[in-house]
Image: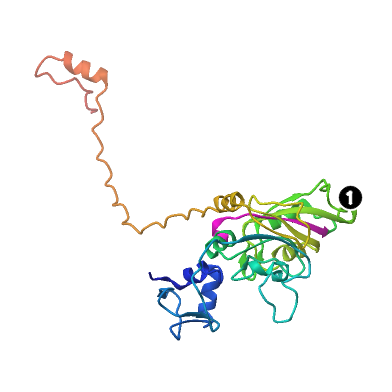
Amino acid sequence: MEERLQKILARAGIASRRKAEELIQQGLVTVNGKLAELGQKADPERDFIKVEGRRIQPHTGEHHYLLLNKPKGVMSTVSDPEGRPTVMEFIPPVFRKALVPVGRLDYYTEGLILLTDDGEFAQRIAHPRYGSVKIYEVKVKGRPREAELDRLRAGILLDGKKTAPAKITPRHSPVAHRRKRDDDEGGENSWWYVQLTEGRTRQIREMFMRISHPVQKLRRVAIGPLRDPDLPLGAVRELTPREVEMLLRSSKEKARPAKKSPGKKPAAQKPEAKKPAARKPAARKAAAQRPAGKKPAGKKPAR
């Protein structure tokens, strides 16, 4: 059965649909020896589909969904041309086949990240249009004023495009399991929760830099409804079926406003004809009391 290439690549766990489109545009995908085109369809059972020279195989069996608490100083990619450590080094070999990170955390950011071989799931969690919320704990230098935070909440211009509104609230009380050196409340630094529905490269760091309160520490603590404060740094575990379903339910696609079809302008209405003024009751009564044929008396003309 023929399907769009980006959907085939996503289902095979190669990448999300969005990333698959980029691979096609970069000329890294071929179908039966010819460069693939965006929007092209193929049959994975019949056609030879290759990504960077390697043939992809239709996914068989169950999908895997893993949660990793990524440490600082690790790339959230499958491989790194500079030889830096990646999230794959924390994954048991039995799970590594076709596994890809869902979204990104930058090199210096720690926290929760999902990995899966289910491309459709990755698309639902990573793409902003599905409204999957990510929550971060941010330690910044100093204590921003409320007016400065309101600027960030409303969105800032980043690479020529305004960021989506963000929710920013203070993290007043430290979490019990965390070491005390993390919690500088009342000192020179302050902690905040930042909630995003989209995540651009280094977005939170850039946001606080714009108001002169650079980020000292950044970690992702929630993906949609999924949290795990007891998962140690560098540890990985499989999601339960209930957690997978919970994540899918929380990432419903946002309704898009329907486009208004251009219609004809309403015809100009003609002004209503004025109705004759009603005769006053007294005038009608006087007219009724006059003898027939007699005209009402008027004033004599001046001589």
Is 131 on the left-hand or right-hand side of 297?
right
Find out whether residue 130 is within the magenta segment.
yes
Is 26 on the left-hand or right-hand side of 274?
right
Relative height, residue 109 to residue 292 (above, below): below
Residue at image point 19% right, 20% down: 297
Relative height, residue 290 to residue 273 (above, below): above
Relative height, residue 213 to residue 2 (above, below): above
Is 195 on the left-hand or right-hand side of 32?
right
Display colour scheme: rainbow
Residue at image point 21% right, 16% down: 286
* Quarter the N terminus occupies: bottom left
* Quarter the C terminus occupies: top left
How many numbered discs sit on the rendered protein?
Answer: 1
Residue linked to disc 1: 186
Residue at image point 57% right, 63% down: 122
How far from the left and from the top, in percent, is residue 151? 70, 57
Few, some or many C-alpha atoms within 10 Å of disc 1 (few <14, some 14-19, many ≥20)?
Answer: few
Which picture quadrant has residue 159? bottom right
Task: Report the residue that reaches farthest toward the bottom.
Answer: 33
Relative depth, front residue between 270 and 8: 8
Which picture quadrant has residue 32? bottom left
How far from the left and from the top, in percent, is residue 233? 78, 60
Find out whether residue 137 is within the magenta segment.
yes
Q: Which residues make up the magenta segment?
A: 127-140
How far from the left and from the top, in percent, is residue 44? 44, 73
Amino acid, disc 1: Gly
Is 230 on the left-hand or right-hand side of 303?
right
How far from the left and from the top, in percent, is residue 165? 63, 56
Which picture quadrant has residue 48? bottom left
Q: Secondary structure at mark 1?
A: loop
Residue at image point 46% right, 54% down: 257
Relative height, residue 202 to residue 190 (above, below): below
